[in-house]
Amino acid sequence: MKAVVIHEYGKPSVMRWEEFADPVPGPGEVLVRVGAASLNPVDWKMRSGAAAQHFPVQFPGILGRDVAGVIRELGPDVEGFELGDRVFALAWGTYAQLCVVKASELAKIPEGLDMTTAAAIPLVALTGDQLMRTAAEAQPGQTIVLTGALGSVGRCAMFAAKEIGANVIAGVRRKQIEEAKKLGAVEAIPIDDDDAIAKLGLVDAVADTVGGNVAAKLLAKVKQGGVFGSVLGSPNGAALHPTVKVNAIMAHPDPATVIHYAEAVRDGKLVLPVERVMPMEGAAEAHAEAEKGGVGGKIVLTA
């Protein structure tokens, strides 16, 4: 097969579209012919070495977490899937023409959803849903600050909050205030404005996708007994707020959740913008563009 392979950590230029041994599915695994894979920040953090402590790459290695494709081969003891099924998942090594996925972590793409869109869903849906439900421990009627509400993870977290019945204060850049309100936030504050954060009253919880100084400032706005949930680790100064419960999570596979969000996207209940679709061999260019920031949606690579 052909794959985007890296032989060392570094800039986007270390990625090469080259021949790589075909993966073979083991017991309980499925071989997927990749149709599309989307970019996520963890991809370029793994490529650069910034995430080496948590996600080391075994060289030569293949990046990629999201995948949508068609089942090519079933490993032993796989049930519930057939050759030719259209599937998607949170997986590993998806920047390739073929990848292996555990059947227990795989889901069938809902009818009416195209493969390119499906590839943009798994990681952000799982991260956003688990950020709101597990990390922030959102409950009906609570007031929760959600940072990065207009990002793909933030949009999924907002969707989860509305399903739960929690009230979201969207933490976004000042220029994004009105757009955030249209997503269903009861209020929006500019987190690039220290005065606005200072004026914020106490809240039940924070669901954070931004980190850094913003996270540290918002930690002080969580009421006693409240929760600070994060996808970026514990915020600075957490020890200074012993009455606030801090939950830092990393997304884990859950096919039912992925299907739920995919159906919401298909039915127009949730919008996850796809900024650009590029061929898989253009992964280096895609990484360079995404890392610059300012991209208004997901970048999807097609194999």
Image (cartoon, rainbow, N blue to C red):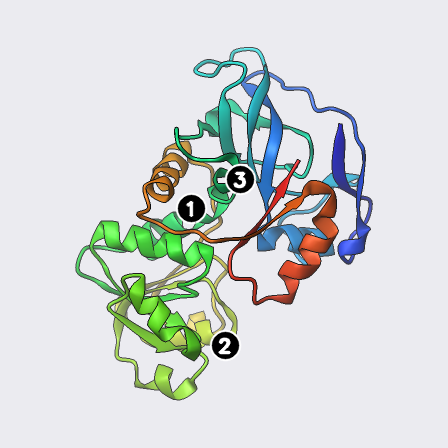
> Between 270 and 140, which is closer to the camera in this rendering?
270
Q: Nearest to the eye among marks 1 and 2: give it.
A: 1
The residue carrying pointer 1 sits among few (fewer than 14), some (14 to 19) or many (20 or more) residues within 10 Å by Cα, namely many
What residue is disc 2 on? Answer: 213
Mark 3 lies on a secondary structure that is: helix
Left or right: residue 52 compared with residue 261: right
The residue carrying pointer 3 sits among few (fewer than 14), some (14 to 19) or many (20 or more) residues within 10 Å by Cα, namely many
Q: Which mark is residue 125?
A: 1
Cα separation between marks 1 and 2: 25 Å
Q: Earlier in the sequence, mark 1 or mark 2?
A: 1
CB atoms at circles 1 and 3 under 8 Å apart?
no
> Quick check: 289 above or below 98?
below
For the point 28% across and 65% down, the residue is: 185
Q: Nearest to the eye among marks 1 and 3: give it.
A: 3
Left or right: residue 66 compared with residue 227: right
Q: Residue furthest top?
A: 76
Q: Earlier in the sequence, mark 1 or mark 3?
A: 3
What residue is disc 3 on? Answer: 116
Q: Which mark is residue 80?
A: none
